[in-house]
């Protein structure tokens, strides 16, 4: 197992019977991607039910074959939360009660004016020798246990809570830095995550193929198609930080030469955060009018903290009456062209802009399905209207594939893309 | 391992380095769900890189602990397709070349006018004793190997190709029927998935603990906390269909005695679909006014196909002007109590109900964070208003835990819960 200058063998163990009953395991993608981005590689990912004996056996097997183990889930207060107990059993280290942790948990509950359920006392137990990782977003703290090995670098075990909103900040704030300090000293890597919109995955793949070929063996690439967006990931490694940096600079220049006009952001950027910054910079405010997406666009825009600085509000006009009464859409537009038409999209965008006194108005009207389609206006036909950015309001037509929820998500992404493009001018 | 009248222990093994580098493993959800629906349970899902030694070790370990193993991937023609080789090594059974399989592969390539690459010859090898499963959608056939065990039912190994479009028809057409015939004859199971709202996971856990204890060893339980919802899953088995049915009837009665008032649905039901049906039944229509959730409530309501039959529209009032101009909230309500107050929530709900001419109005106003909180009105404080269901509109106060998006999701679930409860009357 000695691996001077080699990458450590990292395993991930998920516990949760629901994960073996058909629930998607999004944590696995997230953790594998983050670890890969940091230059680590995962040698095994295992999902087990909430079964202490099975968990303990797996932890024991890990301790005989690999270096680091990240356990996700099983730290909750209920009967089927068994990770602490299983790790204690496998490693023959007792669980120790820490009154100060219980105090923190109690304080958390009282802050939110909830009585503390008896099961939560379990969460104040740490495996002997483990350090606590504070979890400000939940009652279950994480745990880090380092086990020294003779003539070798230490083994490390990490216990993380299951809910994503609790797990991810603990992973990024405590686990990843600890893995780096334990195993990462001789490893320098640079990563680049680019977000593209307005281009399909296969078109982006084709445009980038010469770059991928030219850097074969010298860089690692992943391309991922999302609803109306593409993510392109690249990483390089070097013997020094400077070497990795220089390699990445060259690679990034080559990538941007091919797909630069489609790139709207890097790293944690999203279409909605990019649009928010662009609106603030242009000193513009926004209002939206939604039919088929019914709040999905507004919900995404306002997922950005501070969005109230530029977002004024929105109108969900699920019926024609509301399009007419609240947005001022002409009855004859509705009767002649229908609610799903460029004309209606334009009147909705301009209407909400005027009524809500914003500088920009976006509208979405379309047929999300499964019902409501016709030969002339099939399911997936969506119009996006934009007002306040060009001399005259205009609309864009989309033919979107997929189920109801996919059509709605894609429509929202395209609307954000169209608006961002106009606010930024030519990118 | 003898398990007469017990469910077989089924494991799934995925091979593919990309699955450990952040690519979502949708096969796992699919296979687990299909197996669960067929009454089987998966006791382990493992993902390994394209590494023959690691795969062979895992297959060996499976053969010592479980009954069936489904391997997905690693049947392709390239250097990193190693499932056949690993199974052969682990089970000490040679790979046998089958010229008739190679003929089929060659015919397939000539049909598409492609020359046959040399690597595809690998795909004509079967593990000694294995049966072929034809794969009309790809060049790699699947394999089924049955291993008899003394005094016990056989062990079975299944090799499936990696691409979903090839894997899923082979799984449904050949694997599932074989699993049924091997293990399913004496197996009858009944499943129950209950959805609860208005109760926390730990409170539900406490209320149900006596049922879980009473049925220990006779039923399988899982409890899962979601934002403002709880899922409780139970399964029982019997020697006859009738026995399983009777067991489940007793179990369900015991569960409903404890948590019946919190159960809003079974199986595929969601809060929004339950609310939709209740509104249709009560011949009521709905409109919403949202501040902090900004369209999230409307988007969830309209995720139900056909929701336009009862949902009229909504107003996203992210600024006070819009609360006043579009909803008729009194300026003095805003100045005296603030936008996050029971008074404002009530006026928003009643305002949107009147303006959009619906029978019911729901409003949400609160502080989603991370900014905007104060000692008196902390992040997570949310008011839900309801109009049109009781003699006078009323509001409910929530103190929600979590990050911005979690607070928003929880607020939406609680609003749906409050409304559903009122529309249905006492449940």
Image: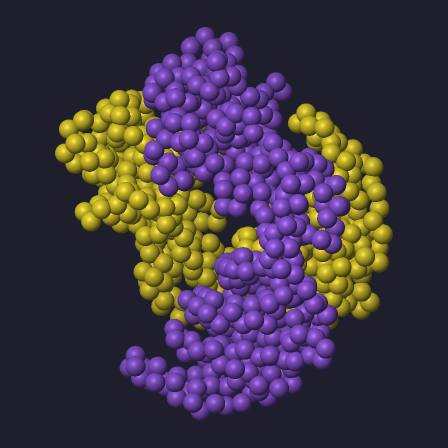
Chain colours: A yellow, B purple
Q: Residue at x 26, y 25 (%)?
A: A321
Q: Residue at x 80, y 54 (%)?
A: A88
Picture quadrant of residue B244? bottom right
Whether residue A69 is visible here, answered yes or no, is yes
| Of B281 and A149, the residue lying toward us | B281
Q: From the viewer's perspective, tell me whether residue B249 is left or right of residue A411.
A: right
Q: From the viewer's perspective, tell me whether residue A68 is left or right of residue B46.
A: right
Q: Residue at x 39, y 85 (%)?
A: B104
- Quadrant into which the C terminus of chain B falls: top right
Whether residue A391 is visible here, answered yes or no, is no
* Residue A11 position (above or below residue B354): below
State the image coordinates of residue B99 (x, y, percent, origin top left): 44, 91
State the image coordinates of residue A40 (x, y, percent, origin top left): 60, 62
Q: Give the total of numbered labels.
A: 0
| Of A33 and B342, the residue lying toward us | B342
Q: Residue at x 63, y 65 (%)?
A: B186
Picture quadrant of residue B39? bottom right
| Of A329 and B196, the residue lying toward us | B196
- Quadrant into which the N terminus of chain B falls: bottom right
Q: From the viewer's perspective, tell me whether residue A95 is left or right of residue B268.
A: right
State the image coordinates of residue B217 (x, y, percent, origin top left): 74, 54
State the image coordinates of residue B386 (x, y, percent, origin top left): 48, 21
Q: From the viewer's perspective, tell me whether residue B313 is left or right of residue A84.
A: left
* Residue A222 position (above or below residue B348): below
* Residue B288 position (above or below residue B113): above
| Of B250 and A371, the residue lying toward us | B250
């Amino acid at each position: 197992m000695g691996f001077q200058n080699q990458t450590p063998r990292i395993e991930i163990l998920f516990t949760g019977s629901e994960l073996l009953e058909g629930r998607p395991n999004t944590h696995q993608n997230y953790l594998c991607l983050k670890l890969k981005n940091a230059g680590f590689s995962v040698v095994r990912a295992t999902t087990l039910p909430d079964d202490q004996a099975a968990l303990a056996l797996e932890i024991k097997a890990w301790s005989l074959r690999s270096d680091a183990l990240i356990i996700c889930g099983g730290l909750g207060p209920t009967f089927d939360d068994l990770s602490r107990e299983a790790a204690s059993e496998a490693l023959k280290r007792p669980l120790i009660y820490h009154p100060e942790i219980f105090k923190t948990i109690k304080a958390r509950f009282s802050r939110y004016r909830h009585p503390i359920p008896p099961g939560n006392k379990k969460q104040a137990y740490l495996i002997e020798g483990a350090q606590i990782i504070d979890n400000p977003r939940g009652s279950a703290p994480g745990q880090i246990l380092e086990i020294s090995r003779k003539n070798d670098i230490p083994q490390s075990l990490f216990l993380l809570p299951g809910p994503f909103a609790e797990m991810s900040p603990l992973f990024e704030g405590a686990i990843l830095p600890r893995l780096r300090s334990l195993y990462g000293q001789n490893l320098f890597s640079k990563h680049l995550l680019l977000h593209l919109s307005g281009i399909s995955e296969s078109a982006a793949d084709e445009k980038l193929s010469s770059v991928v070929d030219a850097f074969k063996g010298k860089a690692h690439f992943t391309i991922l198609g999302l609803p109306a967006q593409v993510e392109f990931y690249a990483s390089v490694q070097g013997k020094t930080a400077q070497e990795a940096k220089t390699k990445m600079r060259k690679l990034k220049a080559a990538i941007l030469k091919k797909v630069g006009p489609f790139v709207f952001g890097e790293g944690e950027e999203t279409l909605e955060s990019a649009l928010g910054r662009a609106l603030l910079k242009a000193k513009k405010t926004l209002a939206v009018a939604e039919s088929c997406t019914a709040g999905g666009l507004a919900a995404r825009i306002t997922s950005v903290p501070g969005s109230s600085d530029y977002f004024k509000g929105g109108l969900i006009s699920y019926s024609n009456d509301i399009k007419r009464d609240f947005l001022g859409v002409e009855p004859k537009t509705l009767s002649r062209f229908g609610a799903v038409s460029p004309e209606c999209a334009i009147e909705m965008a301009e209407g909400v802009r005027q009524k809500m006194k914003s500088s920009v108005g976006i509208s979405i009207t379309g047929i999300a399905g499964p019902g409501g389609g016709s030969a002339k206006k099939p399911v997936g036909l969506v119009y996006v209207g934009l007002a306040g950015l060009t001399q005259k309001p205009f609309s864009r037509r989309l033919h979107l594939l997929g189920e109801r929820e996919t059509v709605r998500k894609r429509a929202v992404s395209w609307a954000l893309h169209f608006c961002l493009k106009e606010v930024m001018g030519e990118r």
